[in-house]
Structure formats: structure tokens, C-alpha cells
Amino acid sequence: MASRPCKFSDTDMLALKDVVRRVGAATHIHPTSLELHAGGFNTLLGTTLSGKTTLMQLMAGLIPPTGGRIESGGRDVTGVPVQKRNVAMVFQQFINYPNFSVFENIASPLRVARLAEAEVRRRVGRIAELLQLTPFLERRPAELSGGQQQRTALARALVKDAELVLLDEPLANLDYKLRESLREELPRLFAGRDCTVVYATTEPAEALLLGGHTATLFEGRVTQFGPNGAVYREPVDLTTARVYSDPPINTAQVTKDGGWIRLSDRVSWPAVGRLSALPDGAYTLGLRPHHVRPGASGQGDVHVECRVLIAEISGSESVVHFDLDGLTWVSLSHGVHGFRIGESARFGLDVARGYYFAPDGARVGG
Amino acid sequence: MARAWGASAVARIRLESVRHSYREHPAHESDWALKRIDLEWQDGGAYALLGPSGCGKTTLLSIVSGLLRPTSGRVFFDDQDVTDLPPDRRNIAQVFQFPVVYDTMSVYDNLAFPLRNRGVRPAQVDARVREVAELLDLQNMLAHRAAGLTADGKQKISLGRGLARSDLNVIMFDEPLTVIDPHLKWRLRSKLKELHQRVGMTMIYVTHDQTEAMTFADQVVVMHEGAIVQVGTPVELFERPRHTFVGHFIGSPGMNVLPCDVAGGVARFAGVPVATANRAEAGGGRTELGVRPEFVRFTDEGIPVRVVGVSDAGRHQIVETRHGDAVIRVLLQEGEAVPGERAHLGFDPAFTRLYVDGLVAGEDR
């Protein structure tokens, strides 16, 4: 299997059709349908225990679904175990063979597939070059840094030209800066390949930067799937907006009453444009922290005086938590905006960038 | 409210010529996990130790807490030499990456544990536990079993157990948010910051994550290969990195570092003269320009580049450009237009500096 180059036509894909996974009385994955195109980079974004790992195990054939079907390239693979599938996986806890050299670690799937020695050398050499492991090929994993060990695990997953590559929070245990550079490298590594990549992460920023498609997960359900900028900017519901916001999205209960949206006795703004057609009633407003600015800046902002709860300055950005009529809201802005705790300050809410959700959570008003 | 909390304790922490090697007979410079550290932390400050893994920050932390005795040099708490004192006599609370919680006990009993261990009277224990619970927003969970809490809840208990002691000199955090999901991270991080402002106790926060270090601390100590490369406020580290390592390590993406020529007091990149905040004097050595992506702009003329990629980071865009082999990243706001393939760049002179062999060439003009 391993030596078979994976070439797909455009219609080839990994498809989950109403896949369900129950364990005893608990439902780990609610009926889920997803179509992942061959050659695509896909991210599963959700908190710990949202179902990312279970979904990947189902895709890989590590566990069987209790309902629904899984198809790969048009073929039903629902009951096919992982050993008979051309799948590669990398986990958060990188696993290497401690007694093998880095070279033999990377070569191991090719050895299993009984490839000729020259071909093994050629392939390991190429992938090691790509992942900057060439100087370490003769060492044992224990002699490497965490980042080098994880790159070794990645190299082993990539060397065999798998049809499906599953990466379960592969960078979570690495240093910030190393994560930054591998995150940049990864989509490039896969760019020239036909395999389908699925990457699980808890971090919205990581999902955004990786590009490709994103599926947001919450409590065992896929809430939305699409090109990742579209899911980020056009969330279909409040849950998706929450999953795809870091820092967390600010929310408030608002009321539409005639031509106005009212947040509190003193904070309201005209319901114009896309909002004018909304029926009167209660909605949840969602506004990301970078659309809330300290001071009086943006045109069309709704300005409000609030008490500052805490200010965090990262050097390039300021994060200010403030009390918006009983709610704790957060403003994230460029530059340095120092505040004393308890002082009163003016914030501009760029409400035109806000999302409105009906009581059932569905987004309304475009 | 400088000393509202641990009323009796005082601690200015001072490290004097501290060196440490895990080898018995260190011979080479690289045998030293800590090369030579002189450092002073004022009482009541919020500090961070920031650097990549292997930079020596955990070694330094262990020397302060007493888990390690330095190969040479002294450690002082105020004027008392504590170099030879064991950890339990230094009155330090530590919060680690993984929460240390007694799962079968209630939240209340977890918080009371260190006090009861020290034979504190029950009425005092109760008062203190309630005080700590209030600080950490745990009042409504005191009767709950610790096992049922979320990761950030458990981490708050680890912290609360330290805070409950009244004889505390300092609280040290070793990567406390690493295993916590991003949305809870924000919550707990602001809680730590708020806590520091309310109790005014010295806190030292060790991390490889610049965002955590920069948002928590008033002063950040950046470490690299067993040495301190810069100590400064978050703004200083961001706006005036003294070393290209600091420029690269802090900021996401990090500072652009570009090879340049220097002649007649003028730095040139790609043949284009570039104005710098510091004096452009080379004096031999490898010369580089450092400018953060935040301070690079697309202009009508200047340094000619090719635009090779754009990454969507949500609230901003990271544009990758190239001149020859050199990569120059530019930060644009969400929605700002990205020019076509051929473009020109200009650097903000107030935030562009010349570095020689990695070190800033001189003071700003």
C-alpha cells in the first residue's frame, strides 16, 4: 500500500455520512456529515472534549462508528480497520521508537512495506531535508529537542505517502516560537501532495493561519464547515462564533424595538441596513474584542463610558477588561493603552461588525 | 495597596553572580546551564522569566525556590543569604504546569490543607479559606469535590493553596497555563493579573509564551542560552529590543532581521539607504537591520519587493514579501488592501535599528 502513489480525481474525497459514535449511554459524536476533498488541508477546531479526537479516530478506522457510513474515494471503508487503510497519524504526545536512530524511525513504515533499500534512503533523505532533520539522522530520539522529536514523528507520517494524514494537536507541546515556524511550514509541506490532511487544534489563531477549511466542533457536533476565513467571519450561530474567537467574543442581550437596538438604558443604536428587517424582540449581540476600541476613534462607533477592571499590555497590543453595565467586556487594540483599575474610560463599540443571534442561537440579520 | 495580603512577609530577591552547571566538572562555556546571572526583583512586583525551552529559566526558578543549589553565587531574600536554605524554609508557593489537587477532597478542604498541616486554629483556617475563595471566585464551589472541576478551576485551587499561607514571600508560576484551553486561558490569566494587583505580593511567572509573559508582568526577563539578554517592560521589549534574539522571540511574527551594509554613517539594505533610530556605526562585525512587521509599510518608492503570500490572522493580515533571499513580513489590519505582486516598502525610522553581531549597535540618537 505504502508504495502506491496517491492520485485522486477531483471527485475523490473522504466522506462521513451521518456518522454517529455512542459509548454506552453517552453520545460522543452526534450524526455528522462531512466531505473532505483530496489534497485539502482541513482543521478541526474545538475545545478539549469537543469530539476532535473521536472524529479523527473514526476517520482513521481506529474505532468503528455506531451509525452511518465512511467513504474514501467513493469506496465504503466503514468497517475497514486502520491496518488496512493508508492512514498516517501524529499525536500531541509524539511517539518515536527510542532504540532506533532518527533515520530508522522515519524509515519504519517503509520497512514494513518492504521497500528496496535505495528507495528507503531516497525517501527518508528527501523528507529529512524538508523537515531540517538531516544533521540528526544518526542520533537517537532522546538526544533531540522536543521540536526535533516532533518533526521526526511528522517525518514518519509523511514519508509513506498516506492518503489520509491525521494530526491531533501536533504542536501543542512545543515552544511558542517553534510552533510558529512549524505552523508556517506545515501547509507548505502538504501543498504539493494529494493526501487529505486533518489537523485538530484548540486554538482559533492556529486554525486561521493554517488556511484551508475549518470545521468547528462543540460537544460532539460539527457546527459549521467551510473555507476558514468564511467560518471565522460569517459564523452561522453563536456557538460557532464562540468556538472561533480568541480572545472570547463579547456578548450581550439586546432588544430590537422599532428602529433601535437597545443594550441597556443608556446604550442603544439605530437598527439600520441589514438590521432594519429584523422583527422586534430579544437577540444576543456578539462583538469580537478587536472591534471594541479604547478612546474615541472609529466612525460609526457607539461610545460608552465604562469602569476599567483590568488592563493587560503585551507591547504591541492592549487588552482592557471593562464593566459594560454589569457585563465584563474586553477590548483588544493596537498600541499601548494604559489604564488604572477602577478608572472610567471611553470605549467605542464598532457595532456594524457585530453579529446578532436569535434566542435559538441562529445568526440573523446577515 | 502594596502589602495588603501577606502582611508579615517581605522579600526583595537578589541573585548575585549565580552560575549553574549540571556537570560535575564544567569545562566549556556550553556546560553551563546558567552562565552568570545578576538580577534583582523588588518586593511586590509582577515578573516574568521568558525564553525557549533549554534557555535556563527553569534552572533559575529552581535556584530561587531552593530545589537546586547553584554551582556558584549567592541568593538573597532581602538581606538574608538563603543559598543554603531548603525550599520549605523559603516560604515560597509554586504553581506548576499540571494542577496539584487532592481530587477526593472538597475545594474547601483543599484550600484548608496547608493551614491545618501547620496547626493553624480552625476559626483562623475558616476565615482564611473564605478570603482566598473570594479572591479566586471559588466561593460557590467550596463544597464541591475538586475532581469535578475544569482545568482552570483546578489550577486556581493549586494557586489558592499557596495563597492561603500568611507567611508567603513569593509565588512562582511554572508554565501554569500550558494545559489549559485558550478561552479559559484568557480568564485565568486576567485573574492572575487582577490577583497580583489586589494582593501586591511578589510573583514570578516562568513561560515560553510571550503573550502570557507580556500581559502578566511589569518586568520581563528574557533568557537565551543560559544568559539574560534583556530585562524590560513589555513596551520596551517590543519597541526597543536590544538583541535580535529578543526582536525575533517577542512578537508574532517576530522582528524582521535583514543583512545590511553600513558606510559613512548610513545603513543600506538592497542599495536603499535606511534611516535608523540608533547611530549607524558598524565597527566591523555582522551588520543587520531590525524592524518589526508592525513598523513596515507599503509605499510608492523605497525597497522593491515581491509579495509572495498573505496569511489571515483574523484581526490582522501577515504579508510575506521578498527581496532576493531576504523575507520581510508586513502587518496589515483586517480588511486593509494588499498590493499586487510588485511593491515597495518603507520602514518607520523610529523603530528601525542597526544591530552588530546581534546586539543593538548603540543608543538611540
Image (cartoon, rainbow, N blue to C red):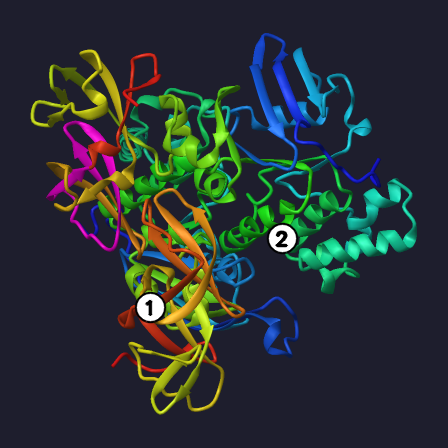
Q: Distance of mark 2 from mark 1, alpha carbons?
A: 38 Å
| Left or right: A216, with B200 as reference point | right
Q: Is residue B85 magenta?
A: no
Q: Secondary structure at mark 1?
A: strand
Main SS of residues in magenta:
strand
Q: Quadrant of residue B214?
A: bottom left
Q: Which mark is residue B233?
A: none
For this rendering, which residue is in front, B173 or A308? A308
Q: Is residue A130 visible?
A: yes
Q: Residue furthest top?
A: A25
Q: Work out which quarter of the rendered image holds the N terminus of chain A and state it.
A: top right
Q: What are the residue bounds of the magenta stretch?
A: A321-349
For this rendering, which residue is in front, A99 or B192? A99
Q: Quadrant of residue A135?
A: bottom right
Q: Secondary structure at mark 2?
A: helix
- Residue drawn at x 28%, y 33% is B124
Observer-side mark, 2 or 1, equals: 1
Q: Position of residue B300 (x, y in %)?
A: 31, 66
Q: Position of residue A363 (x, y in %)?
A: 33, 20
Would you say the residues marked 2 and 1 are in contact, meaning their CB atoms lie under 8 Å apart?
Answer: no
Q: Work out which quarter of the rendered image holds the C terminus of chain A and state it.
A: top left
Q: Is residue A334 magenta?
A: yes
Q: Chain of mark 1?
A: B
Going by the numbered disc 1, the residue's amino acid type is Gly
Residue carrying label 1: B346
Residue carrying label 2: A146
